[in-house]
């Protein structure tokens, strides 16, 4: 864990170097991914089944690669009732939040008499990647599928590595409106969604988190399909004053550190005594945390405590451009309103990041690795597209035609110019 003090003469240089560090150095996987994508594109399902045997030790065929409706029903039925209730609660809130993002279609007549406008339509088919193993979370299903369903996407295809499907994941898939579930993971899953593979029909966009192979595959298929983002390790910055309970703030920091040894948790506070108290609490909580091994590695290698005046916090947060930032201070909006770069902002002492992961309603698929400088979290807008509308009658065309001809001729495109000039009665 690093310590930074604002009063140190080299603070700006040392903090700047820390902010620019990369924690998501990719493995050397691109050659493998390229081979997988090429094979699936050429061979389809046989390649997918071959890679399932090679990478996942799973024997599948055209029938068993799909999770049947009976399996989904039976698996979801095994989900504990309190978890099913929580899934339903979260799904309602996520859908309500994202439905409020829906933009309106528009038509208007401008000063030239041209009718202009736009309309929004949903994508036809979306693929959702849901990791297996430790990262098989029902919240992943909800956060990716519910906004797609709210947007009106007709087909939501979920892929997840072969293995036992958790009842909570199946219950979440039912609640979220997933259309189909396939037992396929890794780069071959991304390839199957992008190009199609036997019964797995191609989609228009692929969303959802994954390992280095999945991320590399998403990068390579972009253009054939859309993707959400290239996600890195999770991040949290907590801005807290000494009026907080150190145990609360320590728990908030560890809530992200437990995700992955490469995750990052940072405290910004104006009190060195409070920083020391939080540090002691982190150590104490790590002793009993079931995910303590990953959290301890994250805190040791990538954690940080920054002691600085709180008025400096917005500038420091912007420099980090984190996935999540909490303002656990007396008047959180005063500081938060000055922040430009953050995936999600949590205001007040009773707004821990964990509620955003599950039930607040906002999306937990957020930009990482300083991508909050130029991108946003997953939303309804990821599952709809805008089409321009242009309606020009003869009178309006008399206004638009001549400058169209002039610009086309200036660009050396005579057919463009003729397309307008011929309607003006010119040869």
Image (cartoon, rainbow, N blue to C red):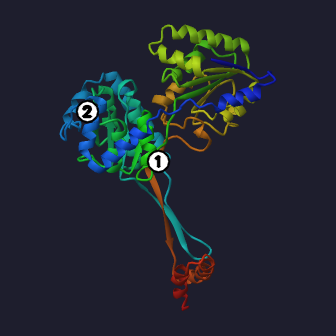
How many numbered circles are shown?
Answer: 2
What residue is drawn where x is 71% and y is 27%?
Answer: 15
Residue 181 versus residue 387 in the image, above or below? above
Q: Can you see residue 137?
A: yes
State the mark number for residue 239: none
Label 2 neighbourhood size at 10 Å, few (<14), some (14-19), many (20+)? some
Which is nearer the eye, 99 or 220?
A: 220
Q: Position of residue 101 (x, y in %)?
A: 50, 47
Q: Position of residue 263 (x, y in %)?
A: 53, 25
Q: Can you see residue 201?
A: no
Residue 51 versus residue 84 in the image, above or below? below
Q: Residue 23: which quarter of the image?
A: top right
State the mark number for residue 382: 1
Which element is circle 1 on? Answer: helix
Q: Position of residue 104 (x, y in %)?
A: 50, 56
What residue is drawn where x is 30% and y is 26%?
Answer: 166
Rendered-image quadrant of the N terminus:
top right
Which element is circle 2 on? Answer: helix
Task: Specify whether 173 is left or right of 312.
Answer: left
State the mark number for residue 53: 2
The CA distance from mark 1 to mark 2 is 33 Å
Q: Residue 184: which quarter of the image?
A: top left
Residue 181 versus residue 109 in the image, above or below? above
Q: Position of residue 164 (x, y in %)?
A: 27, 26
Rendered-image quadrant of the C terminus:
bottom right
Task: Specify whether 421 is left or right of 39.
Answer: right
Task: Specify whether 375 is left or right of 143.
Answer: right
Label 1 neighbourhood size at 10 Å, few (<14), some (14-19), many (20+)? some
- Earlier-in-chain disc, 1 versus 2: 2
């Amino acid at each position: 864990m690093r310590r930074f003090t604002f009063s140190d003469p080299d603070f700006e240089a040392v903090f700047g170097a820390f902010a620019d560090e990369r924690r998501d150095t990719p493995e050397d996987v691109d050659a493998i991914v390229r081979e997988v994508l090429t094979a699936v594109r050429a061979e389809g399902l046989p390649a997918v089944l071959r890679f399932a045997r090679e990478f996942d030790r799973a024997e599948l065929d055209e029938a068993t690669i799909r999770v049947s409706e009976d399996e989904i029903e039976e698996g979801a039925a095994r989900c504990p009732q309190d978890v099913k209730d929580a899934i339903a609660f979260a799904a309602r809130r996520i859908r309500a939040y994202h439905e409020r993002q829906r933009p309106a279609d528009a038509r208007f007549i401008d000063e030239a008499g041209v009718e202009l406008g736009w309309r929004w339509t949903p994508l036809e088919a979306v693929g959702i990647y849901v990791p297996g193993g430790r990262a098989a979370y029902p919240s992943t299903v909800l956060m990716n599928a519910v906004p797609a369903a709210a947007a009106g996407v007709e087909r939501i295809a979920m892929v997840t590595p072969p293995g036992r499907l958790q009842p909570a994941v199946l219950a979440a898939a039912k609640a979220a409106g997933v259309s189909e579930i396939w037992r396929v993971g890794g780069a071959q899953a991304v390839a199957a969604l992008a190009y199609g593979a036997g019964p797995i029909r191609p989609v228009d966009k692929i969303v959802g988190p994954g390992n280095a192979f999945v991320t590399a595959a998403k990068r390579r298929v972009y253009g054939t399909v859309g993707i959400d983002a290239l996600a890195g390790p999770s991040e949290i910055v907590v801005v807290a004053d000494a009026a907080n309970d150190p145990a609360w703030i320590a728990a908030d920091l560890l809530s992200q550190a437990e995700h992955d040894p490469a995750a990052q948790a940072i405290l910004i506070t104006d009190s060195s005594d409070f920083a020391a108290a939080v540090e002691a609490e982190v150590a104490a909580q790590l002793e009993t945390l079931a995910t303590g091994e990953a959290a301890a590695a994250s805190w040791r290698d990538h954690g940080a405590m920054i002691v600085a005046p709180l008025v400096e916090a917005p500038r420091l947060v912007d420099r980090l451009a984190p996935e999540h930032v909490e303002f656990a201070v007396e008047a959180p909006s005063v500081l938060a309103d000055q922040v430009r770069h953050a995936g999600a902002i949590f205001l007040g002492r009773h707004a821990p990041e964990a509620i955003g992961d599950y039930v607040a309603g906002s999306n937990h698929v957020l930009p990482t690795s300083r991508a909050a400088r130029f991108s946003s979290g997953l939303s309804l807008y990821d599952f709809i597209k805008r089409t321009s509308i242009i309606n020009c009658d003869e009178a309006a065309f008399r206004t638009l035609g001549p400058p169209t001809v002039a610009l086309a001729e200036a660009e050396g495109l005579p057919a463009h110019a003729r397309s307008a000039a011929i309607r003006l009665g010119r040869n």
